[in-house]
Amino acid sequence: MRLDPARFLRCLALVAATAPLSAACTSTGSTHDGGGAEASCADSVVHRGATYRGHGELARDPATTGRQVAGVIPGCDDTGGQAPPGRPEAVRVAELVGVPLETAFRWNGSIFVRDGRELPPETRSWFRAPRCSTATRFELLADWLGVTGPNKPRSGGDLRPPYRLRVHVVEGPAAYVGATIVVHTDAATAPTLGPEDVEASLWTGGRVVALVRCDKGRFRALALRVPPEQ
């Protein structure tokens, strides 16, 4: 996954501190499931003649069986009618544990649900990010997906706290692994991320290590660094 540096700088300069995280400042696509192409206008996938539609943004990684099956993205037009619709595109979709393929599957970081079907109630937790609840400080290793903040970045993408990192946790306490969370920085975060870190990691979809403590359910960063050898 990659972020467009120019788009990132524009977004970071414009998003207010109290505003929700902006999708425009985050990367697209995912490497956490069956995946495939990054389709900007694909909100549906066809499997065995049935249409499945995207069902919200995942906050936790659901378990998959390891089995992948064929799907097709219908030809779509994301140019506002300025060009003919694109060709249908073959993709591989991932079977979910406990949910039959006739109901839903995972593709490109999202759950797709068949028209006329509903997800079982026990899947609701997939769409709720965990609150920070660990009593002691701890470290997280995460893929960072986006950043927002109130301060206009200096040249080279120099981030100035406060800002918020949207990350997907790959290592840390079990309650958070596989979850997409927001890590909050402030003036007390030290060290924080510099221009070299932004260039080396965020723009290329890299990783970040955060030393964190819980603050009223939020993940508050005491220190941030980019791990070596990304």
Image (cartoon, rainbow, N blue to C red):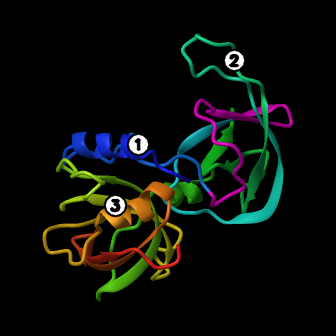
Residue 36 among those drawn in magenta = yes
> Measuring 78% from the left and 65% from the top, which residue is drawn there?
66
What residue is disc 1 on? 23
Instruction: Give the amino acid at mark 3.
Output: Leu
The image quarter in which residue 88 lies = top right
Q: Is residue 13 left or right of residue 120?
A: left
The image quarter in which residue 48 lies = top right
Decide if residue 169 is in sight here: yes
Which secondary structure, mark 1? helix
Mark 3 touches mark 1? (CB < 8 Å): no
Q: Residues within 10 Å of mark 3 (few under 14, many from 20)?
A: many
> Measuring 23% from the left and 43% from the top, which residue is drawn there?
13
Label 3 – label 2 distance at C-alpha = 36 Å
What residue is disc 2 on? 85
The answer to which of marks 1 and 2 sits earlier in the sequence is 1
The x, y position of residue 215, in whole percent, is: 21, 73
The answer to which of marks 3 and 1 sits earlier in the sequence is 1
Position of 136 relative to 180 (above/below): below
The x, y position of residue 111, in whole percent, is: 62, 48
Which secondary structure, mark 2? loop
Q: Residues within 10 Å of mark 2 (few under 14, many from 20)?
A: some
Region of the chain picked out in magenta, as a range? 31-51
What residue is disc 3 on? 165
Position of 49 relative to 76 (above/below): below
Instruction: Give the amino acid at mark 1.
Output: Ala
Q: How many marks?
A: 3
